[in-house]
Structure formats: structure tokens, C-alpha cells
Amino acid sequence: MADPSDDLHHDPLLAAVSRELRTAPGPALRSVARALDALSRERRRRWLAASAAAAVVLLGIALDLRIRARATLPVEFSVRSPASHAVTVVGDFNDWNRAAAPLTRHDGEWTVTLKLRPGRYRYAFLLDGSRWTADHRSPSADNDFDIPTSVITVAN
Amino acid sequence: MIRGATAEAALEQVSVPDRADRLSWQEEIDRALAQLAPDQREAFLLKHVEELNYEEIAGLTGASVPALKMRVNRACERLRTLLKDVYHG
Amino acid sequence: MTSTFPPRSSPLRTDRGFSRIALPLAALLVGASQLSAQDPRLAARLPHGTALAIQALMDSAGRQGLPTDPLVQKALEGQSKGADSAQIIAAVHGLLTRLETGRAELGPNASEADLVAAAAALRAGASSASLHALRLLRPNQPLFVPLSVLADLMTEGIPADRAWDSVREMASSGASDAAFLSLRDRMTGTSGGGTSPRLPPVPERPPGNQRPDRPEQP
């Protein structure tokens, strides 16, 4: 149920206030900390401790890490399956959508290159829409659903 | 009000071009926030800066969701009144 | 994706004094009527009751400042593989529990990638104490590569002590992420990742460069 206080899209002035407080970390943190003076001692202590930690994270090295974490890297997936007519790779990087990432065939070897952010991804190949196979060149993933699954770790 | 524009376009037309303007806008915001009642200020910040939902704010503050919505609405009204003359959008 | 300050993974979202709640299935379904808006991917692909149960788990994760996308991915994995609702919900619940442990051991600055890798390590048999130790050994760096490697070593059959000893030693000596991945590749004979993981090959490829088929997983 929509509520006038739910979002500020309809109100340019308040949207500007909200955006200013959210996007100007230095003064905004001090401003937010000051503005919360009226909170109980316990809540204020927790808020300021978290704010100080947030300042270290956001204004220091972690800012760089976050920027790096957003950058994608090209990752090639390949599987040898001369008998298949269609192969897709299905995994954590494409919502386990069985058709989202079709591979292309050259001489019985199927490949596709996807751009992935750093992280750990479970995946498997789907042959001809019906047969799952793991990637034998990659480490095995633990098995939640009785189907062989692989894992890839993408790092900077 | 900008006639015929979507909310998105309206937001995009807001600009705070140079540092002096930006600093004084921040100061005005600080001053306006300081004039809110503490519970209204808290509710506004948790909702529209920290971007918690009402259930989360209720859990944090112990207030009911209807009470929080009222506080946020009152904070919004007061901030509009306090800032309308210094806002250039 | 809009960026928010503080970001959803920030410490400002985690230290809120909510006690961690064990979630028996019945309680989830009873609380289903109070859910916030559903993730459309769940609604599109899962039966309604299952989607509600998963959404309740996601809401719990959100309240604790934990990432929710890994939970969605786990649910969608189950759906894609034809699992039944009970299996899917159990898998997501298990993952949530491991994410909670990961957050408890790695602290509020752990990224989503760190927590996902921590959950994998726990699932593979790592102790929560080892997560905590890794945090202390590499205090200001992402941990998802060492944790991922730890998980992979154990899943591939390396005994837990040996796997942990190798990872701990490398972390103590300040090894790079690339070194961790090389260790994993050497110990398991696989090549799932690296500093330039499997970039598209140069045009000329040596023929017959294939591994023999590995035995099916039990």
C-alpha cells in the first residue's frame, strides 16, 4: 500500500535533502551523528560506533576495494561435448536460467565468455536442454540438489 | 512545479553546482534537522537516509509503524517549510 | 543499480541489536502474511507457498544486514534443477544459517562475496573458528579467495586438517589471492579460477589438450 512517506520521488526538495545526506559522507556523517543526539545513550553509542566503522570502511581502503569489486572480468566456460546440439551454462551469475548463456561450438568443444564480478559462483552445463554435467576442469561444488555442480572463483 | 515532467526528470533538474552553494545547502539541512522534534528527526533519518523500512525502524525504536509514519510525515512537512526558501531546484 | 549511502552491506545496517532467530519452517509460513514485496524472480519461477517461504528467509536476512541475492540464487538453482519445494526451502535455510555464522565470525565489514565463500567453507566442513582465524590473519582484505580455496580443497577430498593448515599458512605469510588459487589448482588438479581466470584463448590452441573424464560424483 503506497504511503506518502514511503518515498520522496514526488517531492523534489525532500528528495534533494535525502540525496544530500546520503551522498556527502563527511559532513553527512557528522550531520547525522549530531542530529541523533536526542536518542537514548545506548542507541547513540551504537550508532556512533557503527558510523566510525563506516567512515573507516567507506573513506579508506575499502572504497577502493568496492570499486574494484564492481569491475567485471571476462571468464571463459568450456566443455567438450561433440554429441550435443545445444549447450548452455547455468549458474549463480545468471539466476540459474537454463537458456541465458548458450555456448558456441568449435570442433566438439563448446565455449562462451561471460563477464563476471569477483566472487564465487556455482554452475553447471546443460546439454541439449536436459542433461546436466559438471565442469570437469573446475573444482566440484557441494551438492544441494543431487546434480553435479562446479564452482569458479573469479578474482582481480 | 515543473509541468508535464516525470518525477525522474524533475530530480535530474536539481543541481547544486559549486562548492560554496553545496556547503551552505548542507548547513541549511543541518539547521533544519536540528529544529525537528527528536523522534521525528530520528524517524526521517532512518527512513530516508538509512533507508530502512518501517518494520525495521519499529524494531529498532520500539515505536509502532503507524506512529512512525506520522513522525516521518510531520518531519517532511516541517523540513519543507524550513527549507523551501533556500532550496534552488 | 542505485548506490545508497550507507550501502546495504554497511555496518550501519548490522549493529541493531536484533537477536538471531532460529526459523523453524512452521514459523516461517505463519509469518508469511507480514512479508515485504516479493522478489519477482521467485514469484515467476516458484510455487506461491515456496516463494513466500523463501521471501520470509530473505526478510530475515535483510533484517540482519545479510545479503539476500545468494538466497535467491540458491532457490533458483533448486528450481532450475527440478528440486521439490521442501528441498529448496531446506537448502535456502541452510545457506542462511551459514551466512549468519559467516557474519558472526568475519565481522560487519565482510562483503557478500566473503560471506558466500564463508558459507561454502562451512558447508564443506570448515569450523567457524577457522573463519575467525582467517579474519584475524588478513584483517583488511577481502577473504573470499582464501575461503573459496578452503571450501574447494575440502570438497575435492583433501582432509580438513591439511586443507586448513595450507590455507592458514598462506594467510599468515601474506600470500596473494593468485597464490591461493595456484595452491588449490596444484592440490586438486583443477583450474577453476585465477587472477586472469580463463581469459578467452589466443587463436592457436594445441590439439588434444583435454583432461580425461573424472568419475561421476557420488
Image (spheres, coloured by chain):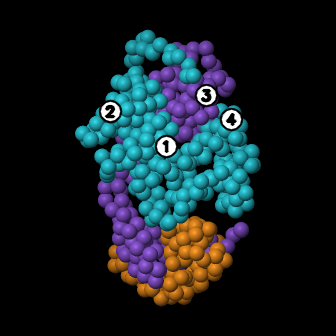
Chain colours: A purple, B orange, C cyan
**Residue at point 47% right, 40% down?**
C122
Q: Residues within 10 Å of mark 3 (few under 14, many from 20)?
A: some
Q: Chain of mark 3?
A: A
Q: SS of the residue at dot 3?
A: loop
On whether disc 1 and disc 2 are found on a single subunit, the reply is yes
In this rendering, the label closer to the viewer, 4 or 2 = 2
Q: Nearer the viewer, residue A68 or C204?
A: A68
Q: In the rendered structure, find residue C166 and report the number of the disc placed on it.
A: 2
**Label 4 or label 2, whichever comes before in sequence order:** 4
Q: Chain of mark 1?
A: C
* Residue that numbered label 1 is attached to: C119
Q: Position of residue A63 (x, y in %)?
A: 35, 56
Whether tag 2 and tag 3 are in contact, CB under 8 A, the answer is no
Looking at the rendered structure, the kind of residue marked 4 is Ala
**Label 1 or label 2, whichever comes before in sequence order:** 1
Q: Residue furthest top?
A: C208
The CA distance from mark 4 to mark 3 is 10 Å
Image quadrant for the N terminus of chain A? bottom right
* Residue that numbered label 3 is attached to: A147
The CA distance from mark 4 to mark 2 is 36 Å
Looking at the rendered structure, the kind of residue marked 2 is Ser
In this rendering, the label closer to the viewer, 1 or 4 = 1
The CA distance from mark 1 to mark 2 is 19 Å
The CA distance from mark 1 to mark 4 is 21 Å
